[in-house]
Image (tube, grey):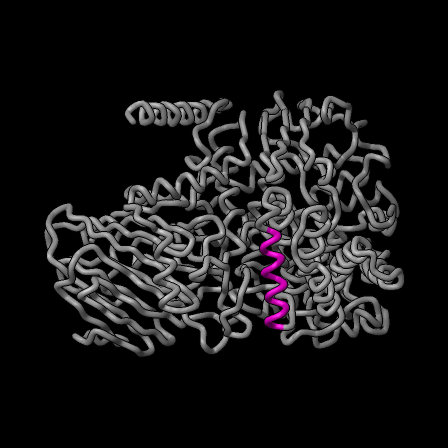
């Protein structure tokens, strides 16, 4: 043990030394040691540096835990600049904008019994806080108590170290309808929370059970703000308080589990802890996280780069959340957030496809195809239980964002793993056709404006439906995804051709006069008073300079519309050379995405929001791949830090992190529903990807450095390689890819048409 401690100590010293001296670190310690769950937590309503909280959880766990600094119900549940903690919350929140559901919290208190969130809160310092994915610890100064948490997927252990005092633990089941029951003879508290932010049936409950290892000397409950001696409470806002006399340094342990199904199932979920004590469970959690993070091993970077990479990788392994449990026979079952019944099979939730179809799901298809197969089964269950595929689920259907991007999620999963799948793809294809040709029960489900789109070929501006250009562009890509899947499933030729033709609808909103995508009226006229940098009603959280590039599947066709490669390159360059001025839509205020773009100082490139994140890679389609290599490295260097202000906008369910992970490896899925990844340039001297099929992808770039960001030469399995893309199918066979890096661009490599990535127009 001592040798291990000494080894870790030396590794840390070595890392710090390398960071301070700007030197490359050759042999980092375990990847879990690089993860900073506080990265991105310095955020608020007006400006996002990630808009995340420290998620203390297992990968894709049903429950997360987090310290709570915000008021009950506040979407900003933990903010780095806060000074006090109000409780330790079980959370299912995917983002502050979606808020939480089924939450409850624990909080230790000493001395005077204080149970309301205002009275019980305590000052804390980040200097006395330790956050890892599998373990959290903090000292609560006002109560002289140290709280520790270590989780499983559906359960957790708490350990409270108390002083010599009258000591209490407050269990807050929140408002909007809750219940608690104290069972002193069993040292147990049970209860449920119904609090939610939408997307649930009327019978929704999160049932929880808490078992302590110390007998209760005080047993109370509260109804709203009234504390009573009753052992049960069912009210708008219920909670419990248990207390005992403690000695200095005495530790009280709690085992906690919850279920969306029943109290009985919550008790069953408690079995995840097994007979493990706190430290054993903590060590088990560490091993789980290391096992997942070690599937991608990077070498030859700075300490900051290691921390950023593995912190981002951690974020890619949190969502979508497992929303299923195991019954008494060991079979997967789930409470349906669509029909309120307990149904067999898998269910996943808390992800918005508008964000995550771009890179997060392609990452899962590459590194976790077995998990993604279960996700597809979950989508099939969602369709059967609701009649629709979700576009933003939390936990059920939510009316936010645009597009019909479930088409990309379903099509890509099958196309990239068609040789090894075991789910009903035909019914999922039926679900895609249903969603593509019907308006849903809310505007974010199915296709809002579908009658316009199918008749005119675009969603018009000036009707009672905003974001017309963005909808048109995303529907066109979604039609491409359906077209690709239809071909793979050998659907009738007429059907295949229909979706191929619709996938070209992006052309209907391209304005040749300005060279940008532009709102178009029902009569065919383009909207007047057009400004490409105005965040207008025709675009979603962006402007035309952001959305013009949302032709993921046919960049060659877009190049043709713009007048050829040189004109296309000039338009790409304009994104970076145009001042980062904010021009809000008429009558609209400044939203946080605008400020995040403005202060980033990269012109109109708004990396803090998803629509433009792929744009940097498009130089590869026009024969100037070195510009992609330059801007990818610039973005990684300037927009990401392993610090509380580490992101340049929302880290939406792993998408912005997945961009970094892919980009650091040297390639990116511009067109998810295709076989290709578009090349950037690797960040590290070496990266090794361990695939689920047993094969490995090894990326060697021994001359890589802060100056050497350009690819001069490339070999794929010892053969010269000039293409600007990689094939998913070929990568699955295993590969050794060697990059020769330099500090000046090679302006000949990757300039031939045959080296360019896939476009529908060339299909």
Q: 435 or 430, which lies in front? A: 430
Asked if one can make out residue 6 in the rendered structure from this viewpoint, the answer is yes
Residue 10 picture location, percent across and down: 36, 23
| Quarter occupied by residue 239 | bottom left
Q: Residue at x 36, y 68 (%)?
A: 263
- Say if the magenta span includes residue 731: no
Residue under the image location 71 percent in, 40 percent down = 728
> In the rendered structure, which segment of residues is drawn in magenta?
372-386
Question: In the drawing, does residue 359 fall left or right of residue 718?
Answer: left
Residue 313, image x, y percentages: 52, 42
Left or right of 29 on screen, residue 563:
right
The answer to which quarter of the image holds residue 449 is bottom right
The residue at 79%/53% (across/down) is 488
Residue placed at 33% from the left, 26% from the top?
Answer: 4
Let me know if residue 468 appears in the view: no
Direction from residue 618 to residue 160 in the image, left or right: left
Q: Is residue 380 magenta?
A: yes
Image height of 466 relative to 516, above or below: below
Q: Is residue 642 above or below residue 215?
A: above
């Amino acid at each position: 043990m001592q040798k291990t401690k000494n080894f870790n100590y030396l590794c840390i010293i070595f890392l710090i030394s390398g960071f301070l001296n700007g030197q490359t670190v050759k042999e980092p310690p375990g990847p879990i040691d690089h993860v900073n769950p506080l990265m991105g937590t310095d955020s608020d309503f007006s400006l996002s540096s990630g808009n995340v909280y420290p998620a203390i959880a297992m990968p894709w766990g049903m429950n997360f835990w987090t310290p709570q600094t915000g008021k009950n119900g506040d979407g900003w549940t933990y903010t780095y600049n806060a000074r006090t903690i109000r409780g330790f919350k079980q959370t299912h929140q995917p983002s502050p904008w979606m808020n939480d559901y089924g939450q409850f919290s624990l909080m230790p208190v000493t001395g005077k019994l204080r149970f309301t969130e205002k009275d019980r809160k305590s000052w804390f310092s980040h200097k006395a806080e330790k956050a890892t994915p599998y373990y959290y610890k903090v000292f609560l100064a006002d109560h002289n108590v140290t709280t520790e948490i270590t989780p499983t997927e559906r359960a957790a252990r708490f350990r409270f170290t108390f002083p010599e005092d009258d000591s209490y633990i407050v269990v807050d089941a929140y408002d909007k309808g809750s219940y608690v029951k104290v069972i002193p003879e069993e040292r147990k508290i049970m209860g449920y929370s119904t609090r939610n932010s939408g997307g649930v049936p009327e019978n929704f409950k999160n049932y929880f059970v808490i078992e302590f290892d110390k007998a209760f000397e005080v047993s109370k409950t509260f109804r709203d703000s009234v504390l009573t001696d009753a052992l049960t409470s069912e009210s708008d806002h219920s909670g419990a308080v248990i207390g005992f006399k403690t000695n200095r340094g005495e530790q009280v342990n709690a085992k906690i589990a919850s279920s969306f199904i029943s109290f009985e199932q919550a008790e069953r979920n408690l079995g995840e802890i097994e007979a493990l004590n706190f430290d054993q469970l903590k060590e088990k959690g560490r091993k789980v996280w290391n096992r997942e993070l070690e599937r991608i091993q990077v070498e030859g970077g700075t300490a900051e780069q290691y921390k950023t990479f593995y912190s981002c990788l951690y974020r890619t392994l949190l969502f979508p959340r497992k929303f299923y449990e195991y019954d008494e026979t060991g079979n997967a079952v789930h409470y349906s957030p669509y029909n309120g019944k307990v149904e067999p099979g898998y269910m996943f939730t808390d992800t918005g496809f508008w964000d995550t179809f771009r890179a997060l799901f392609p990452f899962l298809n590459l590194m976790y195809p077995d998990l993604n197969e279960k996700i597809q089964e979950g989508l099939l269950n969602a369709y059967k239980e609701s009649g629709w595929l979700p576009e933003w689920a939390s936990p059920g259907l939510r009316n936010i964002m645009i597009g019909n991007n479930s088409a990309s999620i379903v099509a890509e999963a099958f196309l990239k793993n068609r040789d090894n799948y075991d789910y009903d793809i035909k019914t999922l294809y039926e679900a895609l056709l249903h969603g593509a040709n019907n308006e849903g029960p809310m505007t974010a489900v199915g296709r809002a404006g579908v009658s316009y789109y199918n008749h005119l070929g675009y969603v018009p501006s000036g009707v009672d439906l905003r974001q017309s250009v963005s909808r048109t562009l995303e529907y066109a890509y979604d039609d491409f995804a359906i077209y690709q899947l239809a071909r793979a499933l050998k659907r009738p030729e007429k059907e295949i051709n229909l979706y191929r033709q619709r996938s070209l609808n992006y052309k209907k909103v391209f304005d040749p006069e300005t060279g940008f995508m532009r709102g178009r009226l029902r009569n065919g006229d383009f909207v007047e008073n057009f400004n490409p940098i105005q965040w207008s009603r025709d675009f979603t959280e962006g402007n035309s300079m952001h959305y013009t590039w949302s032709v993921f599947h046919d960049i060659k066709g877009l190049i043709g519309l713009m007048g050829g490669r040189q004109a296309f390159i000039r338009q790409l360059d304009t994104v970076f050379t145009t001042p980062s001025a904010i021009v809000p839509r008429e009558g609209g205020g400044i939203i946080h995405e605008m400020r995040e773009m403005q202060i980033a100082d990269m012109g109109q490139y708004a990396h803090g929001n998803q629509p433009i994140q792929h744009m940097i890679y498009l130089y590869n389609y026009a024969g100037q791949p070195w510009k992609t290599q330059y801007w990818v490295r610039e973005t990684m260097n300037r927009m990401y830090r392993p610090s509380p202000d580490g992101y340049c906008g929302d880290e939406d369910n792993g998408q912005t992190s997945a961009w970094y992970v892919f980009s650091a490896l040297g390639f990116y899925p511009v067109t998810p529903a295709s076989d290709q990844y578009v090349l950037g340039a690797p960040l590290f001297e070496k990266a090794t990807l361990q695939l689920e099929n047993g094969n490995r992808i090894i990326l060697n770039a021994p001359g890589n450095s802060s100056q050497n960001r350009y690819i001069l030469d490339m070999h794929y399995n010892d053969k010269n390689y000039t293409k600007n893309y990689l094939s998913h199918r070929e990568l699955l066979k295993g590969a050794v890819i060697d990059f020769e890096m330099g500090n000046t661009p090679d302006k000949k490599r990757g300039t031939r048409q045959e080296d360019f990535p896939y476009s529908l127009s060339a299909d």
